[in-house]
C-alpha cells in the first residue's frame, strides 16, 4: 500500500488534504514518458508552444478565487493577500512567454566570409522543479513556464504542505491541451525525491528551499550529473540613510519584514538606520506592527496570519528569547494580539533593538515575522554590516541620492539591490543569489540560459 502524505492546515490544525505518495515505479514511468514526450514537444514551433502556454495561464487565472482560498488553507496566508499570488503568477508567466522568441533565437557570430556560424539554444531535456510552500505558485512558475517554453519536459514535485498547487498546474496544462508527458507532477517522499534527482535521465533540477536542502540536491544530482539551480535562504538587509523619506521607509520595510508572516526568502530581516532617523524609524515600525490584526487567515479582516506550522513559530520564539537573554529588547506588546499564543502557529510581530552581530538572530535565518534594527553612523558601517552574512539574496537601500545608493549597491555582496523598495521580484530582471543564498538564475532572458544549452553550428558555404 502506498504511503500517504497529510497536509495539516495552520488555520486550525486539522488535516486539510491527503495524497498517496508515488514510488519508484511511478518515478520510472514518469521519466520514461517525459523523455518520449519531450522529443516531440521540442520539435514543435516555438510560437505554438508559447500560444499553448498562454492558454494554460488563461485557464489558471480563470480559477483564481478557488486557488487563492486553497493557498490560505494550505499554508496560512490571509485571504486578503492570496489573490496577489495569482496575479504575480500571471505577470511572471506572461513576461517569460513574451520574451521567449527573442531570447531563444539563434546567436549569429560575427560574419566570416565563406561560413555560416551560429549558436542555437536547445532544451536540456527533462527538468525537475522542486517547489516550496511559502509562495507555492510564484516560486514554481519561475521555472515551470520558461522550462516548457524552451522545449523541455517538466516533472514538478511540490511541498507536502501545498500539494494542491501541483494539481492546479496539471489542470491548467490539461485544459490548454499540453501533450501527455510534457508536464507531470509527483507527490514524493524525501528519499524518492532524491532518487528522482539522481536519475541519469534527468537533465536539470530547479530547487527552492533551505540551505541544507540545497546541499542535499547537490549530493543527489552528483549521482546522475544533472545540473541544478538553487534558490536557498536569506537574511536580507536594508539600510535607511539619513536622506531617506522616513514615512516611506517605515511603511515599505515594515511590510517587507512582516508580509506573509515574514515567510519569504527575500523578506527584510535586519535593518540598519542612520543615527539621525533611528528613533523615529523604530517608533514608526513598532506602530506599524501594532496595527496588524493577527488571526485566522480565512477571516477577510486578518492582516497577519499564522506561520505554516507550530514548530516554525516556536523556533522564532526561541530565537527572540535568546536575543533578549543576550541584551536585546522586543518592542512589540504581544498581549495586544489575542491570537498570539505559545504552542500555536499564531505569532505576533517581533521588533528587536539593542541587537548586534554577536547575537545569532542577526546572522542565522529567521523565517517569520521578526526583524532586528541597528543604528549606524556611516555608509561604510552599513555596508560592512550588510555584508557580514552567510547569505546574499537581496539588499535594500533607502535614500534620496540615487548615485550614492548605486555606489553602496556596488559594494554589497547580493544578487539584487533595491533602491526605495524591497521584497519584490521583477520578472524582467535576473533572480539570483550569492553565498548561501544559492546559485544559478531564474526569470529574465538570463533565466532561459539556465534551462537550455548552447549548440554551435559551423557551416562552410559551398563555393
Image (cartoon, rainbow, N blue to C red):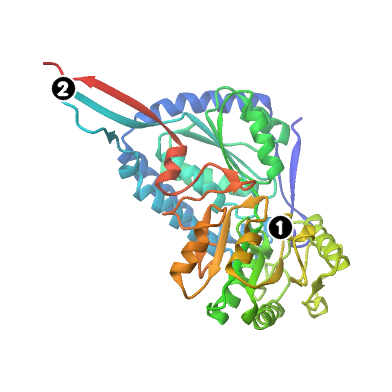
Q: What percent of the width, then of the height, locates residue 261?
A: 68, 65
Q: Residue at x 69, y 61 (%)?
A: 76
Can you name the residue that lies furthest to the left here? 463
The quarter holding residue 287 reads: bottom right
In percent of width and height, residue 107 lies at: 29, 35
Q: Is residue 285 above or below residue 262?
A: below
Q: Residues within 10 Å of mark 2 (few under 14, many from 20)?
A: few
Q: Which is more toward the observer, 274 or 87?
A: 274
Location of residue 380 in the rendering, given as x and y in whole percent from the top left corner: 60, 65
Q: Is residue 409 above or below residue 217?
A: below
Identify which residue, 161 or 447, lies in the foreground: 447
Residue 367 is marked as 1
**Quadrant in the rendering for residue 179:** top left
Q: Is residue 126 above or below residue 169?
A: above
Camera-nearest label, 2 or 1: 2
- Can you identify the residue that label 2 sits on? 114
Name the residue located 50 percent from the left edge and 57 percent from the top edge. 410
In the structure shown, which secondary structural element does the residue marked by tag 1 occupy?
Answer: loop
Give the position of the N terminus as an image quadrant.
top right
| Drawn side of residue 172 relative to residue 191, left or right | left
Q: Is residue 63 visible?
A: no
Per the image, label 2 sits on a secondary structure element best described as loop
Task: Mark 2 or mark 1: name the one nearer the start of the chain.
Answer: 2
Amino acid at each position: 500500500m502506498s504511503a500517504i502524505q497529510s497536509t495539516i492546515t495552520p488555520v486550525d490544525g486539522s488535516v486539510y488534504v491527503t495524497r498517496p505518495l508515488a514510488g519508484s515505479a511511478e518515478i520510472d514511468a514518469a521519466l520514461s514518458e517525459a523523455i518520449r514526450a519531450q522529443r516531440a514537444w521540442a520539435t514543435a514551433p516555438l510560437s505554438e508552444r508559447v500560444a499553448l502556454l498562454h492558454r494554460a495561464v488563461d485557464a489558471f487565472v480563470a480559477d483564481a478565487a478557488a486557488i487563492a482560498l486553497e493557498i490560505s488553507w494550505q499554508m496560512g496566508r490571509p485571504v486578503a493577500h492570496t489573490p496577489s499570488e495569482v496575479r504575480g503568477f500571471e505577470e511572471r508567466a506572461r513576461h517569460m512567454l513574451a520574451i521567449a522568441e527573442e531570447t531563444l533565437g539563434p546567436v549569429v557570430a560575427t560574419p566570416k566570409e565563406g561560413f555560416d556560424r551560429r549558436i542555437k539554444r536547445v532544451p536540456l531535456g527533462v527538468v525537475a522543479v522542486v517547489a516550496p510552500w511559502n509562495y507555492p505558485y510564484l516560486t514554481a512558475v519561475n521555472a515551470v513556464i520558461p522550462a516548457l517554453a524552451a522545449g523541455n519536459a517538466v516533472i514538478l514535485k511540490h511541498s507536502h504542505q501545498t500539494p494542491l498547487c501541483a494539481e492546479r498546474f496539471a489542470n491548467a496544462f490539461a485544459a490548454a491541451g499540453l501533450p501527455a508527458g510534457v508536464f507531470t507532477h509527483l507527490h514524493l517522499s524525501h528519499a524518492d525525491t532524491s532518487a528522482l534527482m539522481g536519475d541519469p535521465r534527468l537533465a536539470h533540477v530547479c530547487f527552492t528551499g533551505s540551505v541544507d536542502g540545497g546541499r542535499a540536491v547537490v549530493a543527489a544530482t552528483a549521482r546522475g550529473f544533472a545540473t541544478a539551480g538553487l534558490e536557498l535562504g536569506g537574511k536580507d538587509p536594508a539600510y535607511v540613510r539619513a536622506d531617506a523619506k522616513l514615512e516611506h521607509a517605515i511603511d515599505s520595510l515594515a511590510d517587507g519584514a512582516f508580509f506573509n508572516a515574514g515567510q519569504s526568502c527575500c523578506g527584510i530581516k535586519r535593518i540598519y538606520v542612520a543615527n539621525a532617523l533611528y528613533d523615529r524609524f523604530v517608533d514608526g515600525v513598532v506602530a506599524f506592527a501594532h496595527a496588524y490584526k493577527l488571526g485566522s487567515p480565512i477571516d477577510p479582516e486578518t492582516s497577519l496570519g499564522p506561520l505554516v506550522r507550530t514548530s516554525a513559530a516556536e523556533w522564532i520564539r526561541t530565537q527572540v528569547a535568546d536575543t533578549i537573554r543576550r541584551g536585546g529588547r522586543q518592542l512589540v506588546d504581544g498581549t495586544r494580539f489575542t491570537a498570539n499564543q505559545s504552542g500555536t502557529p499564531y505569532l505576533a510581530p517581533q521588533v528587536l533593538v539593542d541587537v548586534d552581530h554577536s547575537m545569532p538572530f542577526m546572522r542565522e535565518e529567521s523565517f517569520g515575522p521578526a526583524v532586528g534594527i541597528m543604528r549606524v553612523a556611516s555608509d561604510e558601517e552599513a555596508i560592512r554590516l550588510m555584508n557580514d552574512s552567510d547569505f546574499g539574496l537581496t539588499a535594500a537601500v533607502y535614500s534620496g541620492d540615487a548615485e550614492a545608493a548605486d555606489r553602496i549597491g556596488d559594494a554589497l555582496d547580493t544578487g539584487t539591490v533595491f533602491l526605495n523598495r524591497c521584497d519584490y521580484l521583477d520578472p524582467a530582471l535576473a533572480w539570483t543569489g550569492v553565498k548561501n543564498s544559492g546559485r544559478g538564475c531564474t526569470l529574465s532572458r538570463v533565466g532561459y540560459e539556465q534551462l537550455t544549452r548552447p549548440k554551435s553550428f559551423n557551416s562552410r558555404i559551398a563555393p
